[in-house]
Each structure stands twice: as structure tokens, then as C-alpha cells.
Image (cartoon, helix red, strand yellow):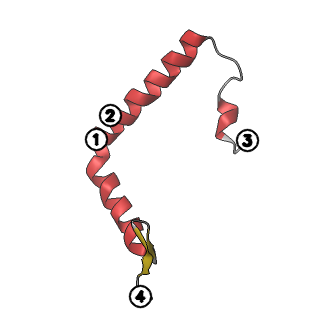
């Protein structure tokens, strides 16, 4: 099996099938966000804490530990 996630998808789909796949993934993402949103945000916050550069203010560097 390939490490490329794109190989899991057929190269050609009908318009209806592409729409159905997109909708299913969209709703799955929404359910995941509802179920695990707090954990996801907590993890994202910890990633931001580990960065030496704040993406919101890249001109300010955090001191090295």
C-alpha cells in the first residue's frame, strides 16, 4: 500500500459521486469537531506554545528555553 493518501481515491468520479464524497467528508469533519473540539484546540494551543515564532506576530521571537 502506498503512503500517498491520494491513491485511495479513484482518479475519475462522476459529478454526483464527487459531491457525495465531499459531503460525507465534510459532515465527518463536523462530527469530529463536535466530539473532540476541546481536545483539538488544546493540542493546537500546545503546538503554538512550542513555536519560537508567533505566527500572529512573527517579528517577536519567544526566548529560548
Q: Are marks 3 and 1 in contact (CB under 8 Å)?
A: no
Q: Which residue extends farthest front? A: 59
Image quadrant in which you'd find residue 29: top left
Front of the two marks 2 and 3:
2
Residue 35 is labelled as 1
SS category of the residue bearing label 2: helix
Q: Are marks 2 and 1 in contact (CB under 8 Å)?
A: yes
1 and 58: which one is in front? 58
Q: Are marks 4 and 2 in contact (CB under 8 Å)?
A: no
Q: CA distance from mark 4 to mark 1?
A: 35 Å
Image quadrant in which you'd find residue 50: bottom left
SS category of the residue bearing label 1: helix
Question: N-terminal of the two: label 4 or label 2?
Answer: 2
Residue 22 is labelled as none
Left or right, residue 60 beside residue 38? right
Front of the two marks 3 and 4:
4
Amino acid at each position: 500500500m502506498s503512503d500517498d493518501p491520494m491513491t485511495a481515491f479513484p482518479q475519475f468520479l462522476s459529478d454526483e459521486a464527487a459531491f457525495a464524497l465531499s459531503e460525507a467528508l465534510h459532515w465527518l469533519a463536523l462530527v469530529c469537531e463536535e466530539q473532540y473540539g476541546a481536545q483539538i484546540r488544546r493540542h493546537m494551543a500546545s503546538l503554538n506554545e512550542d513555536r519560537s515564532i508567533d505566527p500572529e506576530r512573527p517579528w517577536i521571537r519567544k526566548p529560548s528555553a
